[in-house]
Each structure stands twice: as structure tokens, then as C-alpha cells.
Amino acid sequence: MVTYLYWFLVAALVIGTLFGLGVRLGKWKPALIIAVIIWLAATIAYYFWLQQVFVKRFGGTMHITVPEEQYHISATWKDDNLWIENYNPETNECIFREYSRGNMLEGKVVIKNCSPLQSTGMVLPKDSAVQ
């Protein structure tokens, strides 16, 4: 819901700029330049920062894909950053990775000889890709 409000406000700013400068004052070139700058800045801000903030604080949906060779263990929030823990059975490593849409300022922690399923008694499924 907050995401829809955000994009509605961005659209209102772009349309307001085009109407205010372009239609009313007849200055189409500055109106188009400012409208493109507003749209580009809003898109970059959403893509690299605001999506996680909106999901965490106000609810929403994010889609993240776990790599095929790994098993998902858990996910947690640290401030406004989403950390995801996966297990790689081929290397016996637990990988904590900070999720960042733009792959900028992304953290990663690798725990070697992790064996997270060993203490629970669970057995990994026999898969030809894992062997």
C-alpha cells in the first residue's frame, strides 16, 4: 500500500512539473528535463533503498531467489538490512548474505564446517546434483 502511495506521489510530481512548467508557462524543455530527473531519482531511490524500508516498516512483498546449489535456513533484519542464511552442502558452509538490490555495500559472512542439519537429526535429500 505504501509503495502505491509512493509511486502515486512520484507520478503527481512528474505530471505537476509537466503541467506547471510545460502547459502553464510554455517551457517544455525545462519541464521535460526536470520531470525525467524526478522520475529517475525516485526510481533509483526505490530500487536501491526504499523497497526494503517499505517492506520492513510498513509491510509488503519482496521476492528473493535462493541459488540452486544452496538450501535456505533463515532470514533476519538488522536495522533496515535483510540478512539471509543459506547452506551449501557441497562445501559444508553456512553463508550469511546481506540482501541488497543493487549489490552495493553488501556484506557476507561464511562459516566453514557448518553442518546445520547434523544436530537436528535431519538428513539431506539424496539428489544427483548434490552428489
Image (cartoon, grey):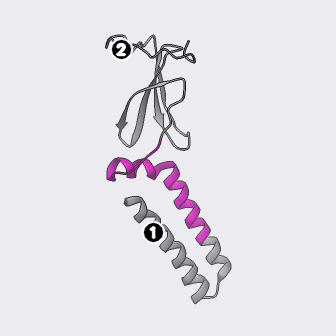
> What amino acid type is highlighted by mark number 1?
Phe
Part of the protein shown in magenta? 35-63
Three-letter residue code for mark 2: Met
- Vertical position of residue 68 compared to residue 92: above or below: below
Q: Quadrant of the C terminus?
A: top right
State the residue lying farthest toward the right: 29
Which quadrant is the N terminus positioned in? Answer: bottom left
Depth check: 54 or 49 in front?
54
Q: Is residue 39 magenta?
A: yes
Q: Which residue is at the front of the view, 25 or 128?
A: 128
Tell me if residue 51 is in the magenta stretch: yes
Crowd rating for badge 2 (residues with CA inside 10 Å; few <14, some 14–19, many 20+): few
Rendered location of residue 75, percent (x, y): 38, 33
**What residue is shown at x 40% (from left), y 65% (from top)?**
5
- Horizontally, residue 52 falls left or right of residue 47, namely left
Q: Quick one: SS at disc 2?
A: loop
Residue 122 is marked as 2
Q: Count the marks: how many?
A: 2
Q: Position of residue 104 (x, y in %)?
A: 55, 40
* Dominant secondary structure (helix, strand or loop) of the stretch shown in magenta: helix
The quadrant in which residue 114 appears is: top left
Q: Earlier in the sequence, mark 2 or mark 1?
A: 1
Which residue does the numbered mark 1 point to in the structure image? 8
